[in-house]
Amino acid sequence: MKAKKRYNYGECEICNAALEEKFIKQDFWIRDELVVVEGVPAGVCPRCGEKVVKSDVGRWIMKLIENSERIASAPKIAVPTIKYEAEEARI
Ligand SMILES: [Zn+2]
């Protein structure tokens, strides 16, 4: 079988729509640090947004995010940080 063939992610477990292959960003908290992995192949549900990652892809990501040197040398992005204020939340 040719490697070109797209992986069939099957149907969404939640709403049964056919999953579409997309490249997504996944975020992980590692020792209080937010790490984003880009370009992750995943099956994405066009209806409810459920995401499914193949087990070998998941395993590879786990290896990537355990590599603290790679994380230290990766480009940084700024993310909005909002503090939850109990006073402000009171309606
Ligand atoms: Zn769905």
Image: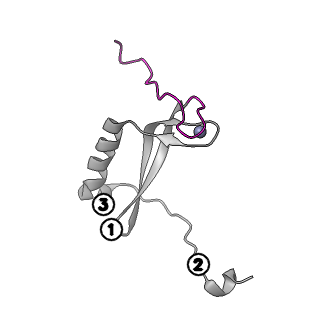
Say which element carries label 1: loop
Gap between marks 2 and 1, in whole Å? 21 Å
Give the image location of residue 26, x and y in percent: 45, 49
The disc at residue 60 is: none
Residue type highlighted by circle 3: Ala
Mark 1: amino acid: Arg
Disc 1 designates what residue?
Answer: 31
Dot 2 or dot 3, earlier in sequence: 3
Closest to the camera, between mark 1 and mark 3, is: 1
Q: Find out whether residue 17 is within the magenta segment.
A: yes
The part of the image, by quadrant, that contains residue 18 is: top right
Query: What residue does disc 3 label?
Result: 72
User: SS class of the residue under badge 2?
Assistant: loop
Residue at position x 54%, y 31% in the image: 19
Task: Please state, as top left, top right, bottom left or bottom right, where the C terminus lies in the image.
Answer: bottom right
Instruction: Mark 1 or mark 3: name the one nearer the start of the chain.
Output: 1
Binning the other alpha carbons within 10 Å of mark 1 as few (below 14), some (14 to 19) or many (20 upward) gives: few
Look at mark 2 in the image and give the residue it sits on: 84
Residue shown at 36% from the left, 13% from the top: 2
- Give the distance between the C-alpha atoms of the residues marked 1 and 3, in whole angstroms: 13 Å
Q: Which residues are magenta?
A: 1-18
Q: Note whether 65 is above or below 8 in the view shown.
A: below
Give the residue at x 29% y 42%.
60
